[in-house]
Amino acid sequence: MTVPLDIFRSSTWGWLRGTLAGWGTILLIGIGLFATLYFRAQGTLTGSAWIAPVALAAGLAIVLAKWIANLAVTYEVTPDRLILHKGILVKSIDEIELYRVKDVRIDFTIINQMADIGTITITSSDETTREAPLVIPHIERARARREKLRELVNAARLSRGVREIDMVHEDFGQN
């Protein structure tokens, strides 16, 4: 069995501090918590004051749902493969052979950059990504992980003697 070089999953904390949706959720929890404590101290949790605990509960439910979704997929990088472990109750394991990877892209917003998270997108000729690229959102240290993946892809190609060839029609678009 090959020893993993890196094991990671999407970060709930990274999502909270590195996206507008995360900031909105933190704000919702903060307002809900403050208003709930304020109305309880006043003894006036009546009328429209019921919105405060509902906002708090909604914010916490969003964080819990995001945490469970992130917990459901773990990514493991070995010298030859990217292995996806999916599921909590029902597990599945999928692999992408690194020599088949065509492109490793990273996307991040200004807020993502401040939180040092990003979204890694992998395109390959593997069955896992034949229909659509593999998108790995909210990854901490995404730039470093992308560079490591690129190095491993090149090493896997060299060890197998594989080269990537793009097939392009030169007469494409001409009548």
Image: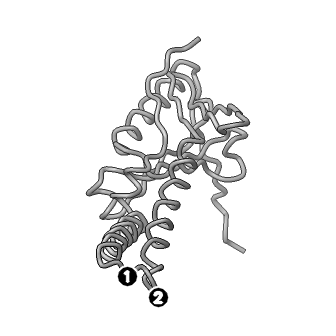
At mark 2, the secondary structure is: helix
- The label shown at residue 44 is 1
Q: Residue at image x 41%, y 56%?
A: 15
Q: Which residue is mark 2?
A: 47
- Asked which quadrant contains residue 19, the reply is bottom left
> Label 2 amino acid?
Gly
Q: Residue at image x 60%, y 40%?
A: 165
Locate residue 154, reporting x and y percent. 47, 30
Locate residue 103, reporting x and y percent. 52, 45
Residue furthest out toward the left:
114
Q: Is residue 1 left or right of residue 149?
A: right
- Asked which quadrant contains residue 88, the reply is top right
Residue furthest out toward the top:
1
Q: Tell me whether the residue at label 2 lies in contact with that at label 1, contact meaning CB atoms closer than 8 angstroms.
A: yes
Q: Is residue 33 left or right of residue 155?
A: left
Residue 90 to residue 159: above or below: below
Q: Residue at image x 37%, y 72%?
A: 36
Locate residue 48, reporting x and y percent. 46, 87
> Label 1 amino acid?
Thr
Residue 71 to residue 109: above or below: above
At mark 1, the secondary structure is: loop
Q: For the residue carrying disc 1, how many other residues have a C-alpha within 10 Å: few (<14), some (14-19), or many (20+)?
A: few
Front residue of this view, candidates 37 and 130: 37
Residue 33 to residue 1: above or below: below
Q: Is residue 10 left or right of residue 19?
A: right
- Quadrant in which the N terminus is drawn: top right
- The label shown at residue 66 is none
- Quadrant in which the C terminus is drawn: bottom right
> Disc 2 to disc 1, how far (Cα)?
8 Å
